[in-house]
Structures are given as structure tokens and as C-alpha cells.
Amino acid sequence: MGKLNNKVAIITGASRGIGKKVAALFAAEGAKVVCAARTLGEGEHMFEGSLQTTVSEIQKAGGIALAVQTDISEEAGCAKLVEEANHAFGQIDVLINNAALSYFLPIKDFQIKRWIRAFAVNVHGAFMLSRMVLPEMIEKGKGAIVSVSSGAAIGPGRGPYTGAGYGGTMYGATKAAIERFSQGLAEEVYQYGITVAAVSPSLVVPTPGTVYDKLVSGMDDPKGESPDLMAKAILLLATEPLDKVRGRVTYSQAILKEFGWIKEGKGHGIDHPGSGYSLI
């Protein structure tokens, strides 16, 4: 019996990177996974990865998966995702808010439309999808919503400053919003037996996006963290008992070490403090 046997899980941003790993792990744990992203086929995006590839690999491994091409920055796109998941598999048990849009630019150079678009994907999409699946979870008296945050939410502090930063203000602001949203929602729905939590990588995860943004030198950068660790941390938060993980804002290696899923860890939450929300 897998940890998610016969559960229905939506994973956004599942065409590549962390989302793809989460989808594969959840399927291996028995979930019926609904993989959402904008890229349906290979070659449609500048980065390698697509929903078709993710779903095909899951099905070849014996898992159950559905691809839903949609734009979660819009209400109609979120509604489409939930409706297709319901039609294919029934009520939603787990929602993983992983999709994110990033532009690493200083604020003085930031295009307003890009700022608005990033908040629409990173924050508003997570809110809309959470709002749409909550009635089903409340009806059943259980469920889990786990959102992916980032070390960028920690921020630079009040100085003194020695440089101009790396242009992560917008991305960090969206992830700080996700952390506050997660703890607030966790408080609201605790009475219904629903887990809500947020988790960041302890170290930067090499993905096509993080390589492009020069956050890591390449997919094999030794300073990075395998996406497998984030996938396991998300699985942990989605499956451990409510009172052990509700309202947690944490980091992949920190939470895995705390629960004994790994023996040693490093990075955010272990070698140095995380964000303010992770300390509450």
C-alpha cells in the first residue's frame, strides 16, 4: 500500500523540475495524479519538458496520470483544471501548488505587466485552486494543500548592504506571500481536518529554469539539491498526520531530517535560519 493509494492529487507546474518529480513520486505511491502546466508537448517551450512527457513516463511505470494544459493565472484556467480532475478521477484529496513564474530583475527595470503576471501565477493561482478544492475537502473532513516556497522569501535583512542584490525581490515577495497565505489558511481549515503547509528547497534545485537564471551553474552543480528531496518533503507534508505538520513553513532537508526520512541535511533550516514564518 502506497502512502497515497487511491488518492487524487493535482500538481501544478508538472511539466518539468520539481513538479515533474512530485507527480512521479505521488503516482508511485498510488495516487491518481493530475498534472497541470501550460506546456503540453515537447518543443512548445524554450525549456525541455512537457505534460505529455511527464504523463507518459508515469504511465509506462504503471501509474495513473492525466495531463491538463491550462493557465492557472486565470480563474477559468483553475476551474478547468479542477473540473477535468473531478471528471476523470473524482474529488480532490491533495493539491500541490508548485507552478511559479520568475524574472530576476532589479525593480527599477521591472516591467509592470511582468510583475502582475508573476503574482497572478505564483500567488493568485494558489489561492484560486485552494479555494476551489476546499469544498470537497471540507465535505470529506480531510485533505492536504502543500505549496512550494523558496529561500528567496527570507530576504536580505536591513543591512548594511555590500552590493545590488541578485534581482530576486519580486520572486521573494510572491513566496513570502505564499508562506503567510499557507499559515493563515492552515488556521482557518484546521477545524475541518485539512493540512496546509509550505516547503522550500534547502538548497537551490537545478532545473532548466534555475540554470537559465544562473542560480546554479548547471544540472549537476554540486552546490544544488536533487529535486527528489523536494518531492519527498512534499509527500511527507501531504501524508503525515494533521497535528504533526499543519501550518508548517519549512525546508526540504530540514523536515526530512526531523521526521527521520534522511539522516543528514544542510542548507536553509539546518545550517542557518529560514524565513520568519518558518520559525513560528
Image (cartoon, rainbow, N blue to C red):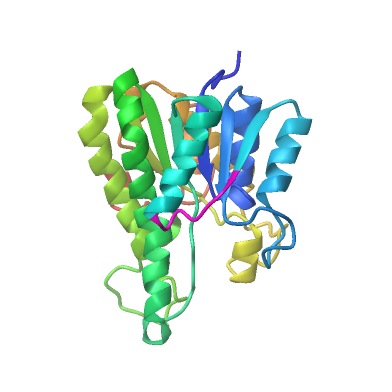
Residue plotted at (66% across, 53% down): 40
Residue 85, compared with residue 116, is above or below; it is: above
Residue 202, compared with residue 152, is above or below; it is: above
Residue plotted at (42% across, 86% down): 109
Q: Percent x, y for residue 92?
A: 44, 29
Q: Quarter of the image for the N terminus: give it.
A: top right
Asked if residue 244 shows in the view, the reply is no
Q: Quadrant of residue 26?
A: top right
Q: Which secondary structure is most common in the magenta stretch?
A: loop
- Residue 90 located within the stretch drawn in magenta: no
Q: Which residues are magenta?
A: 68-74
Asked if residue 145 shows in the view, the reply is yes
Asked if residue 115 lies left or right of residue 25, the reply is: left
Q: Quadrant of residue 194?
A: top left
Residue situated in front as seen by the camera: 235 or 82: 82
Q: Percent x, y for residue 260?
A: 52, 26
Asked if residue 19 lies left or right of residue 61, the reply is: left
Residue situated in front as seen by the camera: 40 or 231: 40
Q: How many marks?
A: 0
Q: Residue furthest bottom?
A: 108
Residue 137, compared with residue 125, is above or below; it is: above
- Residue 71 located within the stretch drawn in magenta: yes
Q: Percent x, y for residue 172?
A: 39, 64
Q: Percent x, y for residue 101?
A: 49, 63
Q: Quarter of the image for the C terminus: give it.
A: top left
Residue 122, compared with residue 110, is above or below; it is: above
